Image (cartoon, rainbow, N blue to C red):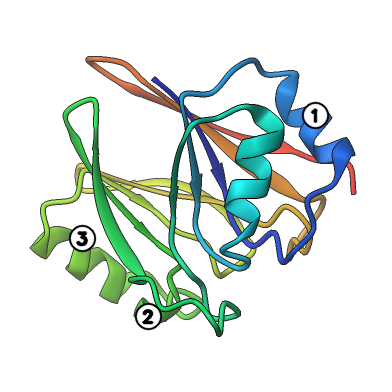
C-alpha cells in the first residue's frame, strides 16, 4: 500500500510539484496533515488518487472537521493530525502520550514545517515537512509504503 503524505501546502498546488510527485509512481492513498485542508482534494484530483484522508490545521479557520482522525492501514492504527493541538512546535511529549493512550502504530503530523522520521518506542512519528514553506531547505512530501511486515518511509525534496 503506497501512501502520499503532504502537509502545510498553504494553498499552493503547483504543477511542478505534481509532476515531481508523479515520478515516484501511483499512490493508493493521499493523506494531508492540514494547512490548507482543501488542497488535499486538489492534489488527489491531479494525481488520480481516490482515497483521501485529511485533517484541518491551525490555518484552516473555516473547517469544522475533526482535527484528529484514526485510520487503519494494512492492520496498523494510523493517527493523523496537524499537530498544533498537541503543541508539536515545542516538543512531541503531548502527541506521544496521546498516541500511546490510543494505541497508535503510526503518527502522521505537520505544523512544524520540519521533516521528521522517528520511532519512539514502537510507534513511527512521521512529518513530511511543508511543500511550500519549509523551515530548512526545499519543500518536501512523504511516501510511506506499507507491507505486511514493514513500513518504508521516504521524505522527498521538491524544487521550489
Q: In front here: 105 or 49?
A: 49
Residue occupied by mark 1: 20
- Horizontal and vertical percent position of residue 94: 27, 76
Q: Position of residue 147 (x, y in %)?
A: 31, 16
Q: CA distance from mark 1 to mark 3?
A: 32 Å
Q: Nearer the viewer, mark 3 or mark 2?
A: 2
Mark 3 surroundings: few (<14), some (14-19) or many (≥20) residues within 10 A = some
Query: In terms of image quadrants, where is residue 105?
Result: top left
Residue tagged 3: 99
Q: In front: 9, or 148?
A: 9
Please report whichever mark, 1 or 3, sits nearer to the chain's N-terminal start.
1
Q: Where, by quadrant of the figure, is residue 77 drawn? A: top left
**Residue drawn at (76%, 60%) of the image:** 136
Is residue 129 in sight in this rendering? no
Instruction: State the separation of the CA atoms marked 3 and 2.
Output: 13 Å
* Marks 3 and 2 in Cβ contact (< 8 Å): no
Q: Position of residue 16 (x, y in %)?
A: 89, 37
Q: Is residue 47 left or right of residue 154?
A: right
Q: Quadrant of the N terminus?
A: top left
Percent from the top left, x then y, of residue 97? 19, 69
Front position among marks 1 and 3: 1
The numbered mark, 1 or 2, whose residue comes first in the sequence reads 1
- Does 87 sit above or below residue 137? below
Q: Residue furthest bottom?
A: 61
Which dot marks residue 85? 2
Q: Is residue 19 above or below residue 126?
A: above
Image quadrant where residue 9 sits: bottom right
Above or below, 75 against 128 in this view is above
Residue shown at 31% from the left, 66% from the top: 68
Q: Secondary structure at mark 3?
A: helix
Q: Residues within 10 Å of mark 2 (few under 14, many from 20)?
A: some
Amino acid at each position: 500500500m503506497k501512501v502520499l503524505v503532504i502537509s502545510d501546502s498553504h494553498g499552493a498546488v503547483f504543477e511542478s510539484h505534481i509532476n515531481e510527485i508523479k515520478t515516484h509512481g501511483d499512490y493508493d492513498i493521499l493523506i494531508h496533515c492540514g494547512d490548507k485542508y482543501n488542497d488535499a482534494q486538489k492534489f488527489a484530483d491531479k494525481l488520480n488518487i481516490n482515497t483521501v484522508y485529511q485533517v484541518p490545521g491551525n490555518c484552516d479557520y473555516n473547517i469544522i472537521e475533526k482535527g484528529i482522525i484514526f485510520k487503519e492501514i494494512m492492520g496498523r492504527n494510523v493517527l493523523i493530525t496537524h499537530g498544533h493541538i498537541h503543541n508539536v512546535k515545542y516538543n512531541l511529549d503531548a502527541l506521544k502520550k496521546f498516541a500511546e493512550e490510543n494505541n497508535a502504530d503510526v503518527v502522521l503530523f505537520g505544523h512544524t514545517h520540519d521533516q521528521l522520521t522517528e520511532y519512539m518506542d514502537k510507534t513511527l512519528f512521521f512529518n513530511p515537512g511543508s511543500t511550500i514553506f519549509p523551515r530548512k531547505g526545499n519543500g518536501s512530501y512523504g511516501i510511506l509504503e506499507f507491507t505486511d511486515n514493514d513500513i518504508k518511509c521516504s521524505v522527498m525534496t521538491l524544487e521550489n
